[in-house]
Amino acid sequence: TGNGLSVFVKDITEGKKAEEALQESEQRFRCLVEDAAAGVGIIDLKGRFTYVNKALADSLGYSVQEFVGRPFKDFLHPDDKGRVTRLFLKSILLRRQSQNLEFRVIRKDGHVLHWISKPTRLIIDGKTAGFQAIISDVTERKKIEVLERQRDIATTLLGAGDLNEALNRLFDNLLEIEEFDCAGFYVVDKDTGALDMIVHRGLPDGFVEKVGHLDADTPYAKVVMEGKPIY
């Protein structure tokens, strides 16, 4: 132009359409999960909740605001915390296919719940940004399973021919209930306090030989009497 003014025009129609499509997709997602009966949660790569729906928060007795920003491990049962955290780290590092994950959580009032979920990767711009999961409460199912196991144990003991057979049957049932791969069963000498392992499964011979008999004043004996694992 005569006064040196230049005008550049850029067509941003496609960009605006993409932005509007993203907003519409997010809105559909929120409408789908906000009022869903199942719990839905999203965590980032540091394991912190970035989103939970009301159902998930209500199930543990917290508000949505109390969830967001907190690590998921804060809500795990202490006995499951290490296992679930290791699986989370493996999923990040090894990009393994997600599997059904069953674990325990603790409500705000202290009650324990059993949950099951199958986390999937949250992909944003082609990169993993976190994990998302639909969570089901299977607490009642677990209670029924325990009752059925207790019935089976009673039936097993009634059918045992002697004490040794009864102990072996009882031990096998307990391993199934607790889902242990290996364990040992000790009896305590009421006079000396010494412990003797009378039944075991899945333990190396060398380990059994080492801890098969524990005098009352040994460190291992004290650990066993406190109910803590030594293997």
Image (tube, helix red, strand yellow):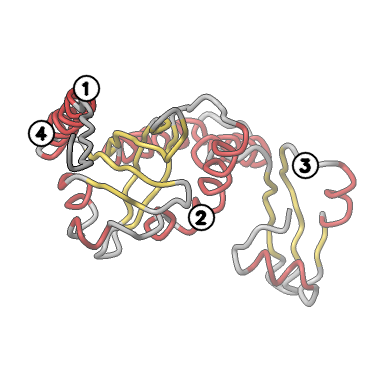
The x, y position of residue 158, in whole percent, is: 49, 33
Query: Upstream in the sequence, badge 1 or badge 4?
Result: 1
Tell me whether circle 1 and circle 4 mark residues in contact (CB < 8 Å).
no
Kind of residue sitting beneath label 2: Asp
Q: CA distance from mark 3 to mark 4?
A: 52 Å
Name the secondary structure under disc 4. Answer: helix
Q: What numbered label is drawn on residue 31?
A: 4
Taking the image as shown, residue 181 lies to the left or right of residue 143, namely: right
Q: Check disc 3: other Cα within 10 Å, few if <14, some if 14-19, many if 20+.
A: few
Mark 4, residues whose alpha carbon is within 10 Å: few (<14), some, or many (≥20)? Answer: few
**Alpha carbons under labels 3 and 2: distance apart:** 21 Å
Residue 80's x, y, as percent? 49, 50
Q: Secondary structure at mark 2?
A: helix
Q: Residue at x 38, y 33 (%)?
A: 124
Relative depth, front residue between 53 and 205: 53
**Residue 23 x, y percent position in the rendering:** 16, 33
Residue 170 is left or right of residue 51, and the answer is: right
Say above or below: 96 vs 63: above
> What number of labels is visible?
4
Residue where numbered disc 2 is placed: 79
Q: CA distance from mark 1 to mark 4?
A: 26 Å
Residue 139 image-quadrant placement: top left
Answer with mark 2 or mark 1, whichever residue precedes in sequence.
1
Separation of marks 1 and 3 at Cα, in angstroms: 64 Å
Q: Which residue is the site of mark 3?
A: 203
